[in-house]
Image: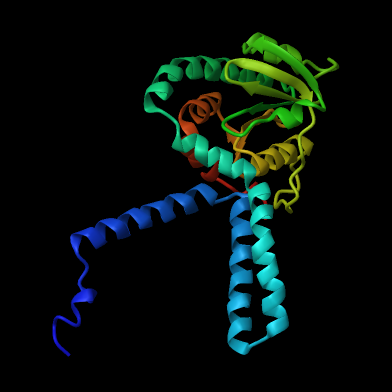
Amino acid sequence: MSFEQLRFLVPSLYDVIQILIVAIVVYRLLLFLAGTRALQILLGITALGVIYIGALVLRLNMITTLLGLVFTYGAFAVIVVFQPELRHALARLGRSRVISFLASSSKRAVADEIAEAVARLARNGTGAIIAVERDVSLDHYLEAGTVMRATVSADLLTTIFTPYSPLHDGAAIIRGDQIVGAGSVLPLTQFPVRDRSLGTRHRAALGLSEETDAVVIVVSEETSKISVALRGMLRRGVTPDQVREALVGGEEAGLALAGARSDASPA
């Protein structure tokens, strides 16, 4: 066998560039899916694919026919199931660095107000849950609460969660620099939780973070500790400064904070 026949084994610069691009895309995709329900669904689809290939090899015609129908019509179901993740990915893809730079000062001002609010609430032993919307809309969760529109301020957030006030039991939802809802009911996590001491607020924070990309901040009424939930992970015992950095630093900073100690995450 001549060298010319084996030439295809030696990649060209063009091939190396393509391989690197594909590797980066796959890596970013897995990083994006890590810790979300989308990754679990993707693993399930992969398992079905392996079963389908095995059925083809073993000539199990009924199984291959049924799985063929699942893959044919399942694509539409996948689009519906992955809708929040797809919106998030497209929003990140189209995000401009210039726009992010211009919005950074406003974002930090909002983060300062939220950090000050949770610091006051923690000092007073007042329970609270605050959901900060990112790319995935939280409109669905506004329906069960009270829709409002007010500029984010530490004073207003503290007032909302004052004990015995009409809105203190639910969650406050923040979009941009506005509080758009209060008293909202959030979904509880559907996964078993290792830490049995977690209350309803913490389970609701995990539940919302599993379904959306929101940053959810919880102040425990029992322990006065502050927690942050993001992408299905919960970090307990954080400081107001860490809350501020999680809100300002983007998803990477939030994931680094939430994942730094994930003993309270779903089992």
Residue 132, position in %: x, y? 62, 27
Location of the C terminus by quadrant is: bottom right
Q: Can residue 221 be seen here?
A: no
When the figure is inspected, residue 11 is found, relative to residue 136, above or below; the finding is: below
Give the farthest residue toward the left.
Answer: 3
110 or 221, nearer to the observer: 110
Q: How many marks?
A: 0
Residue 187, position in %: x, y? 77, 39
When the figure is inspected, residue 216 is found, relative to residue 166, above or below; the finding is: below
| Residue located 47% across and 51% down the image | 29
Location of the N terminus by quadrant is: bottom left
Name the quadrant containing residue 55: bottom right
| Residue located 57% across and 43% down the image | 86
| Residue located 81% across and 17% down the image | 163
Name the quadrant containing residue 94: top left
68 or 207, nearer to the observer: 68
Residue 73, position in %: x, y? 68, 60
Residue 259, position in %: x, y? 53, 45
Q: Is residue 92 left or right of residue 125?
A: left
Q: Is residue 30 left or right of residue 41?
A: left
When the figure is inspected, residue 130 is found, relative to residue 200, above or below; the finding is: above
Q: Can residue 97 be seen here?
A: yes
| Colouring convention used in this rendered image of the protein | rainbow
62 or 30, nearer to the observer: 62
Q: Is residue 214 left or right of residue 108?
A: right
103 or 108, nearer to the observer: 103
Name the quadrant containing residue 186: top right
| Residue located 62% across and 88% down the image | 58
